[in-house]
Amino acid sequence: MNNDMVKLALSQYGIKEIPGSVDNPQIVKYFSEIGHSWVKDDETAWCSAFVNWVAKQSGHEYTAKLNARSWLNAGIEVSTPQIGDIAVFWRKGRHSAYGHVAIYINEDSNNVYVLGGNQSNQVCIQAYPKSRLLQYRRLNRI
């Protein structure tokens, strides 16, 4: 179980995008602190930026990339996830370039519950269908 990542991610719970021309500085900070200071808004897809920020801040390997599927190359694949592992989902199609990434919390027979950013435009726990899951990944400490 990766308590450091979960604890840090939970400290950000409720951080949300600000509608309109104003941007949440905390979301912009996620981008900046992982090497993407060119992103100056909270409308750019930020699920991977959030997971990167959490992983980096808690001393784990991270991709530093903004595409969710980049996490398919981080850590090791696991079939039985633990709280704090990474869950990678497909979006638009199983073989598309689009995806979503977040931190595994729990699951039931139909859904995976993950803690992540850019989930309903905020940091929260949300359910994603198991049918959209690509992989669970366990990150290494660096």
Image (spheres, rainbow, N blue to C red):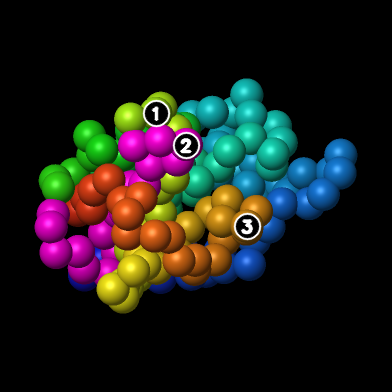
Tell us which disc is closer to us: 3 or 1: 1
- Quadrant of the image for the C terminus? top left
Mark 2, secondary structure of its residue? loop
Return the x and y of residue 132 as percentages of the image width and height. Answer: 36, 50
Return the x and y of residue 17 as percentages of the image width and height. Answer: 71, 52
Mark 3, secondary structure of its residue? loop
Q: CA distance from mark 2 to mark 3?
A: 17 Å
- Amino acid under disc 1: Ser
Q: Identify the residue at horizontal 14%, vertical 46% (top origin).
A: 76
- The one nearer the camera, 65 or 101, is 101
Residue under pointer 1: 96
Q: Quadrant of residue 43?
A: top right
Q: Identify the residue at horizontal 82%, vertical 49% (top origin).
A: 19
Q: Mark 1 touching mark 2, by CB under 8 A?
A: yes
Among numbered discs 3 and 1, the one appearing first in the sequence: 1
Residue under pointer 3: 120
Can residue 59 be seen here? The reply is: no
- Amino acid under disc 3: Ser
Q: Residues within 10 Å of mark 1 (few under 14, many from 20)?
A: few
Mark 1, secondary structure of its residue? loop
